[in-house]
Image: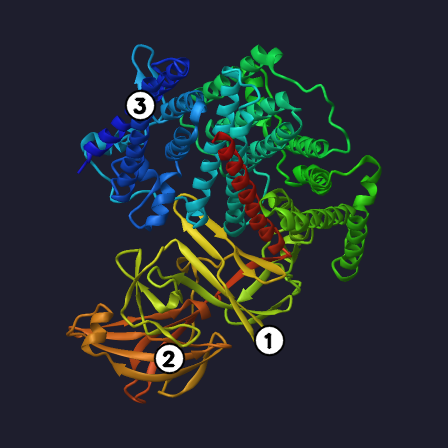
């Protein structure tokens, strides 16, 4: 059944939201023009009503699209492309913004939420600021219109409410237009992670917040309130920087625990596209606070805010236009929106530049130079470093754009963005060092009012203590073969001490002023954490056997990968490793169970326990014949790490996805001083690919011991199956079935194989049982009438194994600690700025 009504409703909401966004932009503009007239109140009320209708329509779009996804209406292309019946609700939420249309809606939604606060607290700024907001909303909602303009046959936007039959050119829809697929294609396996539920909303909330300072700046030019816009824009700029920064760091942690490139930042073009505007955003805030204190840098503040928002739009163009092609794993596919995106970018960039040029001669400038020994000077230097950091990443990231421009004018360009992350890191490390040192110096000058002749003396205690601490660390820590790491360590320790000194004094006097020092301390911890986790990252999965693991691997790869055989101990660093087999994860209780302990059902997303299953604490987690849900794409390789009395299990994952093939994700072993980052590099062949070799027929008695595939095996018993067991195994209740139970012992575990012989209507059949982990399969042939012993044929194949790569990440917790401190610092500063803004507004 095709649910046309819900798609039509959603599309109606899109049209209403687009029309009311345009209407409210005109209404707010009109309200500003009438702000000093008797009609002001009525005009503003009318504009608010229009934007309220727009906001309700946006909520309607969101609710309608999520209802389509939640109710599995796979007749809609968006639901079919991004969701499936077996996704849990939290991943259905992720599937909402997996596609371009959904992520645009997320961005639009956050603009509505932000606008509510502007409308409530904007005061005299509401009309001009909301004019800009409404224009932006009109552009963004046009991206999801999905209408073709009559006469010129120009498609405007891509609708998330398109039916599958209207998108796919499939003959099925010719014979049956109302055909609805049973299931959808599902969510990208890389996005099936809890961080992908919260990372995109946080990131797009940050994107939405950047519109506020931009709107205030444009309004300041438009209304000729050249200085006044900075006050109300300042807290929003800081909030945007904090939220967007947290969103970026969430993405870094997602990459760390989901992707297998061995880290948390890979200088991917899409990562860069968000990182660059964030740097400009933070720089904008610092230039703005310089103006607030010294009345210098007003034009610079305006240029920075315009540059920041232009880069936000540029990042949108990069990731959504298809210009990046295959150069990024994060970019969206091109939906034909590149023209609209380019117009969106150029409209605000050119419009902003024209306004700046037009008003440039009227913008006040300070006649007083900023002194070298002032806090403003060093804060400005910090902002300049942030800008240079952004430009250095921007230039190579934009190479695909340069290529398109050359091609547009008939040329040929084969330039490519650097594929080696080191090409970015080798420059960024020096900027990070300068920025970290500057953050410590700037705090001293900003708060201590240092005089010209006493500058050096003020820093002497911190410098001496820095050198003492660094010398101690150098003596007891790692071998520093790269001098840049030593300089980075010095910068990080100095920043911690300098900002820590300032923080202590501020906490004594007025804690609410401590936000900047706290934020800079967070940055210092992050720098030190990056220094150790990246600079001293070390592969610990050493292959000391001298054997070639895989002929397709390089010599170094063979040396850095470790083969783990099932239930056999291997040494890695100070741990004894034991691979305990392939596992699945049960949805009902989150427990990992061996694949050999469950049986498949007709539903690939359901399994049934083949026996009572106990966890490592000997607690019953599944009774025989219990049915459980799982994701059949996921296989977890259980690797036990033993060090003395300490036992830790890791479960690196391989997801076998129909569209993406085998997707490998690491598991992390967290300790106080380091992480072990482990993922599978080579996995055994599938069960269907195994080659079994038959052994000689064996005639044995109950209780007799023998060897199969080098494992001690005992025939424990031969019993007749009762009615309940016959039903469990899917046999007929009138069948006569004998079960032979073999007990097989490996290094630390006991296993059971239970082949059957079944007699039905005087016809016999032998049902083999196998234990893939040990490479054993047994066929029950029957009873030898002369000896009354039992006849079996053993089969053997390669034992189960996994090849892993494990990387030690020392002191990475300093990085994550730094991110938390950074967020706290942003929070303190944002609270202070909003409080100050509210007082002045009152």
User: x%, y% of residue 803?
Assistant: 55, 59
Q: Secondary structure at mark 2?
A: strand
Which residue, as the protein is rendered here, is positioned at the far right?
453
> Tag on residue 50?
3
First-in-chain label (3 vs 2): 3
Image-based side of 132 in relation to 230, left or right: left
Q: Is residue 101 above or below residue 583?
A: above
Q: CA distance from mark 3 to mark 1?
A: 69 Å
Q: CA distance from mark 1 to mark 2?
A: 33 Å
Q: Which residue is mark 2?
A: 742
Q: Are marks 1 and 2 in contact (CB under 8 Å)?
A: no
> Tag on residue 378?
none
First-in-chain label (1 vs 2): 1
Q: Are marks 3 and 1 in contact (CB under 8 Å)?
A: no
First-in-chain label (3 vs 1): 3
- Which residue is at a point 29% across and 89% down the rendered structure image? 786
Q: Secondary structure at mark 3?
A: helix
Q: Secondary structure at mark 1?
A: loop
Quadrant that contains the N terminus? top left
User: x%, y% of residue 175?
Assistant: 19, 32
User: x%, y% of residue 674?
Assistant: 62, 59
Q: In this view of the protein, can residue 760 be seen by the observer?
A: yes
Image-based side of 386 in relation to 225, left or right: right
Of the pair 300 and 798, the residue shown nearer to us: 300
Q: In this view of the protein, can residue 326 be seen by the observer?
A: no
Q: Name the front one of labels 1 and 2.
A: 1
Q: Which residue is mark 1?
A: 644
Q: Is residue 476 above or below residue 190?
A: below
- Which residue is at a point 54% across and 14% down the rendered structure image? 355
Q: Name the front one of labels 3 and 1.
A: 3
User: x%, y% of residue 182?
Assistant: 24, 44
């Amino acid at each position: 059944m095709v649910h046309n009504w819900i798609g039509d409703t959603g599309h109606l909401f899109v049209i209403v939201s687009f029309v009311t966004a345009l209407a409210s932009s005109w209404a707010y503009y009109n309200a500003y023009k009438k702000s000093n007239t008797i009609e002001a109140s009525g005009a503003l009320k009318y504009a608010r009503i229009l934007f309220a209708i727009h906001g309700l329509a946006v909520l309607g779009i969101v609710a309608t699209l999520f209802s389509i996804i939640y109710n599995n209406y796979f007749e809609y292309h968006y639901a079919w492309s991004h969701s499936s019946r077996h996704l849990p609700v939290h991943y259905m939420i992720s599937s909402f913004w997996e596609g371009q249309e959904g992520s645009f809606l997320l961005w639009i939604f956050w603009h509505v939420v932000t606008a509510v606060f502007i409308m409530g607290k904007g005061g005299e700024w509401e009309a001009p600021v909301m004019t800009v907001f409404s224009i932006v909303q009109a552009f963004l909602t046009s991206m999801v219109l999905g209408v073709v303009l009559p006469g010129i046959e120009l498609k405007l936007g891509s609708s998330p409410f398109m039916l599958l039959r209207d998108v796919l050119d499939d003959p099925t829809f010719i014979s049956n237009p109302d055909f609805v697929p049973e299931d959808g294609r599902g969510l990208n396996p890389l996005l099936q992670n809890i961080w992908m539920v919260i990372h995109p909303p946080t990131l797009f909330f940050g994107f939405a917040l950047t519109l506020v300072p931009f709107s205030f700046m444009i309004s300041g030019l438009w209304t000729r309130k050249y200085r006044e816009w900075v006050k109300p824009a300042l807290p929003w700029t800081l909030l945007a920087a904090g939220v967007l920064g947290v969103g970026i760091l969430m993405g870094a942690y997602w990459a760390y625990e989901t992707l297998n490139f061995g880290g948390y930042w890979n200088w991917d073009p899409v990562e860069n596209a968000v990182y660059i505007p964030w740097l400009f955003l933070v720089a904008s805030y610092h230039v703005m606070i310089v103006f607030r204190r010294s009345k210098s840098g007003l034009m610079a503040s305006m240029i920075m805010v315009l540059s920041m928002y232009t880069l936000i739009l540029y990042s949108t163009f990069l990731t959504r236009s298809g210009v990046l092609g295959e150069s990024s794993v994060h970019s969206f596919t091109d939906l034909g929106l590149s023209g609209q995106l380019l117009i969106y970018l150029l409209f605000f960039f050119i419009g902003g530049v024209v306004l700046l040029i037009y008003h440039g001669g009227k913008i006040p400038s300070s006649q007083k130079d900023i002194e070298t020994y002032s806090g403003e000077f060093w804060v400005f230097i910090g902002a300049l470093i942030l800008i240079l950091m952004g430009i250095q990443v921007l230039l190579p990231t934009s190479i695909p754009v340069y290529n398109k421009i050359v091609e547009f004018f008939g040329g040929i360009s084969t330039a490519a963005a650097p594929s080696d992350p080191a090409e970015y890191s080798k420059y960024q490390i020096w900027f990070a060092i300068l920025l970290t040192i500057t953050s410590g110096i700037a705090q001293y000058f900003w708060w201590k009012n240092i005089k010209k002749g006493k500058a050096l003396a003020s820093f002497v205690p911190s410098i001496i203590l820095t050198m003492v601490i660094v010398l101690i660390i150098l003596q007891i820590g790692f071998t520093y073969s790269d001098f840049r790491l030593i300089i980075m360590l010095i910068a990080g320790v100095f920043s911690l001490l300098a900002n820590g000194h300032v923080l202590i004094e501020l906490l004594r006097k007025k804690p609410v002023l401590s936000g900047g020092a706290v934020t800079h301390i967070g940055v210092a911890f992050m720098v030190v954490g990056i220094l150790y986790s990246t600079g001293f990252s070390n592969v610990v999965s050493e292959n000391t056997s001298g054997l070639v693991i895989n002929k397709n691997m390089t010599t170094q790869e063979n040396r850095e990968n470790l083969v783990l055989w099932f239930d056999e101990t291997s040494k890695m660093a100070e741990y004894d490793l034991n691979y305990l087999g392939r596992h699945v994860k049960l949805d009902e209780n989150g427990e990992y169970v061996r694949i050999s302990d469950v049986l498949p059902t007709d539903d690939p997303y359901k399994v049934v326990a083949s026996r009572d299953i106990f966890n490592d604490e000997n607690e019953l987690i599944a009774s025989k014949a219990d049915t459980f849900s799982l994701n059949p794409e996921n296989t977890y390789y259980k690797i036990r790490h033993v060090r003395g009395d300490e036992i830790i299990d890791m479960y690196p994952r391989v997801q076998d996805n129909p569209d993406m093939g085998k997707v490998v994700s690491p598991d992390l072993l967290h300790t106080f001083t380091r992480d072990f980052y482990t993922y599978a590099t080579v996995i055994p062949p599938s069960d269907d690919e195994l080659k079994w070799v038959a052994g000689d027929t064996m005639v044995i008695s109950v209780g007799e011991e023998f060897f199969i595939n080098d494992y001690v095996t005992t025939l424990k018993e031969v019993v007749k199956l009762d009615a309940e067991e016959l039903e469990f195994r899917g046999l007929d209740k009138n069948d006569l079935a004998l079960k032979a139970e073999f007990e097989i012992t490996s290094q630390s575990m006991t296993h059971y194989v239970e082949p059957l012989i079944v007699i039905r209507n005087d016809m016999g059949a032998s049902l083999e049982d196998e234990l893939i982990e040990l490479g054993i399969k047994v066929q029950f042939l029957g009873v030898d009438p002369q000896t009354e012993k039992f006849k079996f044929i053993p089969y053997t194949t390669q034992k189960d194994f996994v090849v892993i790569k494990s990387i030690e990440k020392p002191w990475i917790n300093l990085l994550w600690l730094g991110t938390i401190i950074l967020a706290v610092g942003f929070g303190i500063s944002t609270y202070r700025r909003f409080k100050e803004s509210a007082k002045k507004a009152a």
